[in-house]
Image (spheres, helix red, strand yellow):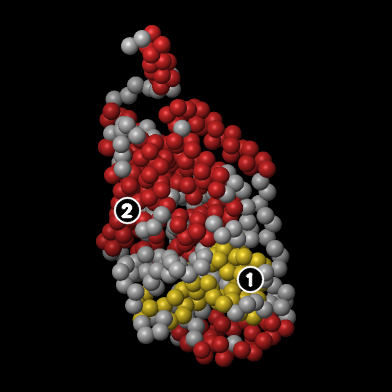
Amino acid sequence: MDISETATVAADKARWRIPSISLPAQTRTAILFVCSAAIGGAGWSGNSALNYFALLFPFVYLQSRSRLDSLCAVFYYAAATWSVIPGSQSFFQTGHNFVLPLAIWAALVALCSAPWVCLFSRRYVPLSVIVAIAVLALPPLSLVTVAHPLIAAGRWFPGTRWFGLGLGVILIAAYRRFGTPMTLAVLVVASIATHARFHRPVPDPHIVAVNTNFGGQSPHDDIDSRLELQEQTIQQIALAHPDTLLIFPESVIPSWNGMHETRWASVFAQLKRQRTGLLIGTTIPIPNTEANRNVLLSRGYTERLSYVQRVPVPLGMWHFREQRRGFPLMLRFPPTIRVWNRRAGILVCYEQLAFWPAIETLAHNPDMLLAPSNLYWAVNTSIPAIQHVAAQDWADLWAIPLYEASNR
């Protein structure tokens, strides 16, 4: 080895040792596990101020020196998705039986963390991170996983669109050259710079998202009379808002058929006269099957069309490999609609948390983001707050106004 090579190696070693602290392997692993759990729990707590932490997980993973260390991903996703346990307990009405909620949570954690663990390479850790992020951002895993770290790019770099998503990946690729201090410095400076020039778009006063408190259906209810009352309430709200586009929550009318069109005909005619447009969350049966489409109907003073939810919530609505019952995948349907001469991107409920449907929607450069949801089953969990944070992240990243309509 000649003198110049010796000098280069020495400088390289010095660069890596300056920010490093010598720790036993077991201690290092334990610290990675604790930090990952803390980041996952804070980043996906539903607190927008803490959502910044979610983007830091890949940089914690970069400290891994063994496959055992890579299990820090399990701790990140376990803490990020723990709300699935009370959520699924309420959704599936399991009472005090936690077997199914725990099984769903464990399966979700396993799916989310598998790419990080299986693709680990000590020699190419940054490449492992980038590939894991890509695998979780694309179908099929993106359709059944949540808490993707890059969703928080909207919190860090609002208004930057593709650049904001790409900056995190670039810093991961350059991490070994930059080191921890420089990487964090670039993240913070870039975030401050983007926030300094970002102004969240002001919502259009003629577009109103309506929140309802209809709850869910109970077997003890007089269902027909209750649904009739809900429809009357929707009609009254609509007729009281001339020159307005109203967005109602997901499944605010449980099912829509030809009788509804007839029953609502006079209301729709009046809404056209007063220039009121309606976007109504409901479901439409798929002919010759037991399956349904979850849709957002456009009626009144709007073009007559419907947005079809592309990715229903797995297990709860979408039954894997089953297209003739439940709510099957509808990936072929468009992610945006034209309403009042604007392009509206729509993310219905679970789609707000899944990376692929969200980024597919935003890739069409919508003028606004609509986020209807039906959250009556999750009112006592952090899930509604988490969905709000994710939807706001997406809207801020693309610098478009967000309109959220939820049923509680």
Inspect this view and state whether residue 214 appears. Answer: no
Q: Position of residue 202 (x, y in %)?
A: 69, 57
Packing grade of label 1 (10 A; few <14, some 14-19, many >=20) is some
Q: Amino acid at mark 1?
A: Val
Structural distance between the alpha carbons of marks 1 and 2: 37 Å
Helix, strand or loop under label 2:
helix
Q: Which mark is residue 339?
A: 1
154 or 213: which is nearer to us? 154
Q: Quadrant of the N terminus?
A: top left
Residue at 34% from the left image edge and 21% from the top image edge: 22
97 or 394: which is nearer to us? 394
Helix, strand or loop under label 1:
strand
Residue at 34% from the left image edge and 77% from the top image edge: 325
Q: Amino acid at mark 2?
A: Leu
The residue identified by callout 2 is: 111
Camera-near label (1 vs 2) is 1
Q: Position of residue 55 (x, y in %)?
A: 47, 43
Q: Position of residue 308 (x, y in %)?
A: 49, 72
Where on the picture, by quarter, is residue 344? bottom right
Left or right of 271 in this view: 288: left
